[in-house]
Amino acid sequence: MAKLVKIFSREYSVQYTEVAIRSLSVEAKTHLPALVTSQTYVPEDGNESCYVDPDEWERFLNSLYRKYQNQKNLNSFFAKFHHYGQRYISTAKQIGKFSLKKASNAKLAYLYRKYQTVLLEYSAYLWMGFFLAQGPQIARAKDIIDRRAVSDPNISTALLRPSKLSSILSLQQHLGELKLKKHKLGKNERGRIQKRYAWLPCLDIHNDPWTSRDLDNFFSDLKPVAEQMTYLKAAKLANLSKNEMQVFKTARELIYVKDMRDEYRRRGIYNILPLFNAMAERLGVRRKDLAFFSYSEIVNAIETGSKLDRDEAHARRRGFLIYIKKQQSVVISSLAEIKFFVDRHVKSVRSNADQVKGLVAMKGNARGRIKTVFGVRDIAKVKSGDIMVSITTHPDYISAMHRAAAIVTDEGGLTSHAAIVSRELRIPCIVGTRIGTRIFKDGDLVEVDAQKGIVRKL
């Protein structure tokens, strides 16, 4: 068996890594074009990195792209994606409204199983949406932009803007308009927005909802976005044919799905927090600890009336290894056992280079000091004029992105969150460098050449 290769890294707890693994396994086979049984997460740089068997992963992606190269199948996928996403949110809301403190242990276990079922189904479509938005449909759109020699960033930005704005992009646009008009965020509007977007930071069960202070900080860092070109005007200026416009129609819908997958997930997690709070109290741990136990561990503890081990939760918060063996989750927190597994099964990537190369998401040039961002914990250290180098970006990173002079990521492509936001803000951006966070350290003086896609130390 080939050594496992890395495909991404995230700030996930045991709860979400386990769902991510299960949602590409036999449990979700009715929704998938192929299975991925090798998916394994190992701790790296304070995050959990996903590794897979490269041959199995290539088969999965090829099967996915073959199935959805047909427009009819792709339209069916869009409909199912939104169906399962909305079903996930509505089920989480329904469960969260129960009188959970008075519920029996059996009732809590039933509700938790119900939640896991709808989350698992939605996560299968979340996965597929994420990788379809990096596949052949997007590559065709990029080829058209290159072939048409589109050099105006206003045109390319409009062509690759989501077909609809997700909530976070709508919020960014609304607050940006207030800033352009030099309006302050009034008390009533602050309360309304904070309540409507309280779900925003809920990346996982151990994250807390947005507060009014978070909103104030977001508004303070926000850069107003200039008036945007419409898609139809951009298509006309790019002289797109009817067939080419269909390519961009599909691409823009995939980009919208890529945004919405995270919104559905966060809103679902926000609404299910009352259940996890109730279970945590019953099991003698905090919700933040409960996030680091597996599905079977939680169900077994609830059904037997036993307590969970807080020390084990704390050990796993420092990093854990997780994979599926014989359809059962294996979770390991022992550093020695993790090292033994990594040395034996994981392909390492080392480099002593003083520059990296990636895909240009937004053209431009910048010089500045590096600030590496491995997770939400690092966002505050990004100051105005810094070069932000991160593994990826997502809505939690937006305030830092507005402060940065340029954005560089290990992961992502033209449809990534970093690419979309940087185009809207006109910030130079290079994505998909793979090793940017490993090459550069805080304080390094670098030049970002987002014409050629190169970041070099000075």
Image: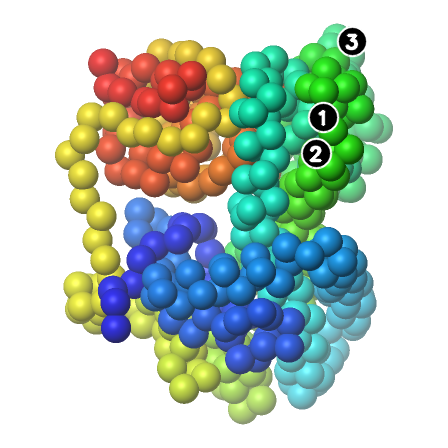
Q: Is residue 240 left or right of residue 376?
A: right
Q: Is residue 372 visible?
A: no
Residue beneath disc 3? 181
Is label 1 in contact with label 2 (beta carbons under 8 Å)?
yes
State whether residue 260 is above or below residue 104.
Answer: above
Pick the residue in front: 63 or 46: 63
Q: Is residue 27 visible?
A: yes
Residue beneath disc 2? 244
Q: Secondary structure at mark 2?
A: helix
The residue that appears at 57% across and 57% down in the rendered structure is 65
Q: Quadrant of residue 310?
A: bottom left
Where is residue 438? Give x, y as percent: 26, 38
> What is the distance, in whole Å, between disc 3 and disc 2 at their CAs?
37 Å
- Which mark, by number, is residue 402? none
Q: Secondary structure at mark 1?
A: loop
The residue that appears at 46% across and 26% down in the rendered structure is 360
Is label 3 in contact with label 2 (beta carbons under 8 Å)?
no
